[in-house]
Image (tube, helix red, strand yellow):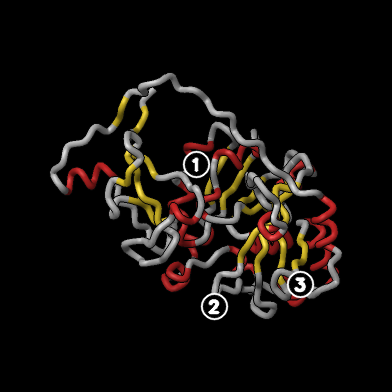
Amino acid sequence: MRKFRYKLEPYKGIKTRFSCPKCGKNKVYTKYIDTENNDYLNDSVGCCNRIVKCGYHYKPKDYFQDNNLSSITSIKPKVPNIKKNKPKTSFINIEIMLKSMFHKKHNYFIDYLASIWDLETAFFLAEKYNIGTSKYWNGATVFWQMDKAGKIRSGKIMLYNPINGKRIKKPFNHINWAHKVLNLENFNLEQCYLGEHLLNEDKDKPIAIVESEKTAIVSSIYLPEFIWIACGSVNNLNESKTRCLKDRSVVLFPDLKCFDIWNDKIPKLTNLATFRTSTLLRDNATEKEKSMGLDLADYLIKIKP
């Protein structure tokens, strides 16, 4: 089995993430390391995780070619490959989730849902998708990730504008995790899809995957012929999360700037389920809308409920 000599540095805390040499954004850049000495190859050789907004990825082979250097691209393991025990997935007590779902404080995201439809529909969606309220920020929402076994992986805490439903990103991006706020020590987060627990309701119904939690929840009302789930970010559509979709029929609804990124992932996932990528947005969006990176919910909410 071939072992690559150069690889992106595994995440070991924020100290292993740097400023991107292209976009200048801090704590989003991962450098390549030489596995023989565990040193960085070069500060310019790495990848920005802002795939859509930046897309910087300078690979080791390009670095060697550009600088007329020779490199051993792979090495034979010097010692037997001993498998390390994978850390067990951590979970949060379901009582904590239920308590947040009956919180008396305002939830700006639920207020937004009520402005589209009514309070009854908003509360129906909150119960269906395990939407809780957090006091971490006034009006904050918790999107609890419950897997098919009914276990709580964690909850993503975010803050929304109650009028337009947009996430609050200034003066900073309002996003955190429940296990961090609860100060749970040695917590090993292994995310699942938001709405994964809904897969048990109808095993023949097709699945629709979107990036945003908000988009999955809104789309479930407009297009109930699908079970709508969200992966949470463009990079979170991956094999480990998708094992729960074994033998299901799945349609991907990527944001306008992410069509190729998601479509290119299908070959790696076809051994798990039947995938296809919706071209609805790509084929009908204007150039301005494409540049804005709109998603399905941006169009659906324009339709009279």
Amino acid tagged 3: Asn
Residue 289: image location, x then y, percent:
47, 71
Q: Earlier in the sequence, mark 3 or mark 2?
A: 3
Q: Earlier in the sequence, mark 1 or mark 3?
A: 3
Residue density around tag 3, few if under 14, some if 14–19, many if 20 or more, within 10 Å:
many
Q: Earlier in the sequence, mark 2 or mark 1?
A: 2
Please name the residue that numbered disc 2 is placed on. Answer: 171
Residue 277: image location, x then y, percent:
52, 49
Amino acid tagged 2: Pro
The mark closer to the camera, 3 or 2, is 2
Secondary structure, mark 2, is loop
> On the rendered image, what quadrant is the C terminus found in?
bottom right
Residue density around tag 2, few if under 14, some if 14–19, many if 20 or more, within 10 Å:
few
Q: Which mark is residue 266?
A: 1
Residue density around tag 1, few if under 14, some if 14–19, many if 20 or more, within 10 Å:
some
Which residue corresponds to the image point at 71% horizontal and 69% vertical from the top-left? 136
Amino acid tagged 1: Ile
Please name the residue that numbered disc 3 is placed on. Answer: 107
Instruction: Give the Cα distance between marks 2 and 1.
Output: 37 Å
Asked whether, in this view, residue 253 is left or right of residue 88, the answer is left
Which residue corresponds to the image point at 49% horizontal and 64% vertical from the top-left? 284
Considering every residue shown, the one lying at the far top of the view is 80
